[in-house]
Image (spheres, rainbow, N blue to C red):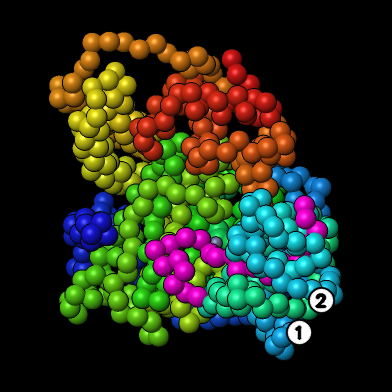
Amino acid sequence: MHRAVTLCLVLAIVSITAVAPAEGRESRTASLLSNEHLNAIVTEASGSRAKDTVIALSTMHRVQASSGFHDAAEYVAARARELGLSEVAIERFPADGKTTFGTFRSYFGWEAESGVLTETGPRARTVADYSTMRVALADYSNDADVTADLVDVGDGLADKDYAGREVKDRLVLAGGNVAGVHREAVEKRGAAGIVSYQQNQPSGWSGDYADNVRWGHLSPYNLQNRFAFMVSLREARELRSRLAGGESIRMRAVVRARMKPSHFEVVTATIPGSDPAAGEILYTCHLCHQKPGANDNASGAATILEDARLLARLIREGKLAQPRRTIRFLWPPEISGTACYLARHPEVASRTRAAIHMDMVGGDFERTKSVFHITRTPASLPSAVNDVAAVFGEHVIGASARFAAGERSVDAYVSPEGSKAQLVGEIAPHSMGSDHDVLQEGSYRIPTVYLNDWPDVFIHTDNDTPANIDSTKLRRVAIVGAATGYVLAAAGPDDAQDIALEVYARGAIRQGEALKRALEFGARGPVTVERFHDARNIVEQAGRIEREALLSILSLTSDSGSAARTIASLVSGVEARTRADVAVVQRYVPIPAAQTSEPAGANLVPKRAPTVVGPMSVYYYDYIEDKLGASPGGDGRIQYEILNLVDGRRSARAIREILAGAYGPVEVETVVEYLRVLEKAGVVRLE
Ligand SMILES: [Zn+2]
C-alpha cells in the first residue's frame, strides 16, 4: 500500500514537471535542461552498452586489493582511454594494515589460487570449489590442508552455541557473520576452520532463496586467519539434519590463498570544464565486490562509464556545450578507496561541488525485487542537488509509467534488449551504506545524489548475475545521471534562478509534509513540554533545510548579484512559510504549563579536531574501536550525523534539534553521551 501511495504522488508531480514535446517552447524552469539537450542525452544513452560492461565486469572476482580488482581497474581504464576521456589513470594506495588515510587504517590485500571442500565420509562429493564459484571461499582465508569432523554450532556467535560441543581441531558449521564465527570458534576455541551459511542482508524474502551462496569475509586485518568455505542454506539445512540424526560427517579442506600487503586501486578520468575556478562535479560508484556482483556494483560502474561516454561524445560533437566545471569520474573499491582518494586529494575534495553516486542501479524488479531510489542528502547537508536529480528521476519514472499504462506515444526510454515495464522507483529520504557516507561526511561535505536499488534478493551472493540486470533500467538511470550531472556541471548564474525556483516550489510540498508530521506528532501521546517543543521543532527544522538548500545553489552555480537577490527573496518566502506553520502548531498543539530543566551538557559546544579527517567507520574499519578498544554501539546514522553537525558553533542542544526534526525523537543525553565518546577518542573538544 505504502508503495502505491508513493507512486501516485510521484505521478502527480510528474504531470507538472514532464518536459513538453518539442514545439519550440522550452520549459526550462520545470526541466532545468532544454528539450534539445535532453533529447541529445536520451538519443545517445545506451542500456545495451552499459549491460555489455556489466557482463564483462561480472567475470572478475573484484575483491579489494586483489588481482581480480586490478583486472577490472585495467579494463575500465582501457575503456575510458578508448572513449577519449582525459587524465585517465589508476592511482594506487598502500593496503598494508599500517598506512592511514585520515581516519581510515588500511587493511591487507588477498590472493587466492584454489579452495576445495570435499566430504570424505560417509559420502564422497565436492561441497564447495573456488575454481567454479568464487564466493565458495571466504575472502581473507589462508593456506590450509585439513581433514576433520563437522560440528553444528548454530549461529556460532554466542557462548551458548558452543555449550557441550567440542570444536577444537574440527570444522564448525555456522550461520552467523563469518568473521564473528572465526573469532568465537577458531581464535577462542581452536576450531580448524569454518563451513558458513551466513545469509545476505535481511529483506522480505529472507530464507526463501535457499540456493544463494553468500560472499563472506574474515577479518582483513588478521594475518592469522584460518579459512571459511561458504555454502547455501539448502546445503546447510541438509548437513544440519544429517548431523542432528547422529551421522558423523568428515570433510577435507584444501586452500591455496594468502593475505598480503597490496594496493587499493582507484581509476580516475575527467572531462575538462571551461572554467578551472568553477569547481568540479564528481561521478562515482564502487568497482569492487565478488564475482559476479552484477547489480552490486558492476551496474553502477558500467552506468557511470556510459555517462562518461555519452557526455564526452556529445560535448565533442558540439551537441552539448563544454561545461563550466570539470567532470571527474572515480571507480574505487567501496568506501575504503573513496576514503583513500579524498584523504590524499584534499584539493579535489574542496573543488568538488556535488557528486552523483551509483551503487546498484540495474536490478530487474521482477527478478530482484529492487526498488530504485534517488536518495536525498542528510539533514546535516541540505542541498539543491536533490531537486535537480528529482526533476529527471520523476520525468523518467513518469514516462515509464505512462508508456506501461498504454500511452504509446510516450518515449519510455526502453532499451532494445530490455524490459518495457514501469521503472519502480522513488525519491527517498537519506539512507547510508555506500561511498556517499565518506563524500558527505563533515570533513568533506560534498552533497551527493545517491542512486541505488534496495532491496535485492541476490545481493552479495553467487546469484547476483547479469541475467537479473535490465538494460532498460540501465538506460533510464544513465539518462537521469547524465542530465543531473550535466546541469550541475554547466550551471551558471542564469541557471541559478531556475534551480532556485525548482527548490522553492518543491520545498513547499516538503514543508507541508513537515507540518502534517508536526500536527500528527503533537496530537499523539501525553501533553508534555517536550512534545509541544518537538512539534514546533519539526516545522522549524523543515524551514532550515529549505533555507540552506536554496543557499547551496550559489556554490553549485556561480556567484552573481542577480542570482543572490533571487535566492534571498525565496529564502524570505521560506521563512514566511515557516512562521506561518509555527503559528499553526502554537495554535493547535496544546501547551502544558510546566517547564522542564535542561539536562547536563546540553549547552556544550563541540569543536572538531582539524587533524581528524574522515568518517568514524570505513568499511571494515572502526576508528573509535581502534582508539578506545570498544565501539560505542547505538544508532550508526544518528552518530554519523552528530559528528557531521559539529561546526564549532552549534551546541549539543542545537544538534539534537536538527536530528529530532529530521529523524524522529532523539534525547539530548544521547547527543552529549556520543560527544563525550568522540572527545575521549580525540575527535572533538567540548567547550
Ligand atoms: Zn554496493
| Mark 1–mark 2 distance (CA, rounded to whole Å) | 8 Å
Q: Where residue 60 sits: x, y (%)?
A: 66, 76
Few, some or many C-alpha atoms within 10 Å of disc 2 (few <14, some 14-19, many ≥20)?
some
Q: Nearer the viewer, residue 526 or 99?
A: 526
Vertical position of residue 554 compared to residue 473: above or below: above
Few, some or many C-alpha atoms within 10 Å of disc 1 (few <14, some 14-19, many ≥20)?
some
The magenta stretch is 188-210
Q: Is residue 589 left or right of residue 382?
A: left
- Residues at circles 1 and 2 in contact by the CB criterion of under 8 Å: yes
Three-letter code for the amino acid on which mark 2 is drawn: Thr
Q: Nearer the viewer, residue 618 or 600?
A: 600
Predominant SS along the magenta part: loop
> Does the magenta run of residues contain 227?
no
Q: Quadrant of the C terminus?
A: top right
Vertical position of residue 534 compared to residue 506: above or below: above
Circle 1 residue: 120
Residue 466 visible here = yes
Three-letter code for the amino acid on which mark 1 is drawn: Thr
Residue 654, label in figure: none
Vertical position of residue 17 compared to residue 602: above or below: below
Q: Quadrant of the N terminus?
A: bottom left
Residue 297 visible here = no
> Does the magenta run of residues contain 190?
yes
Q: Where residue 583 sits: x, y (%)?
A: 18, 22
* Residue positioned 71% across, 78% down in the render: 249
Q: Secondary structure at mark 1?
A: strand
* Residue positioned 23% across, 22% down in the render: 527
Circle 2 residue: 147
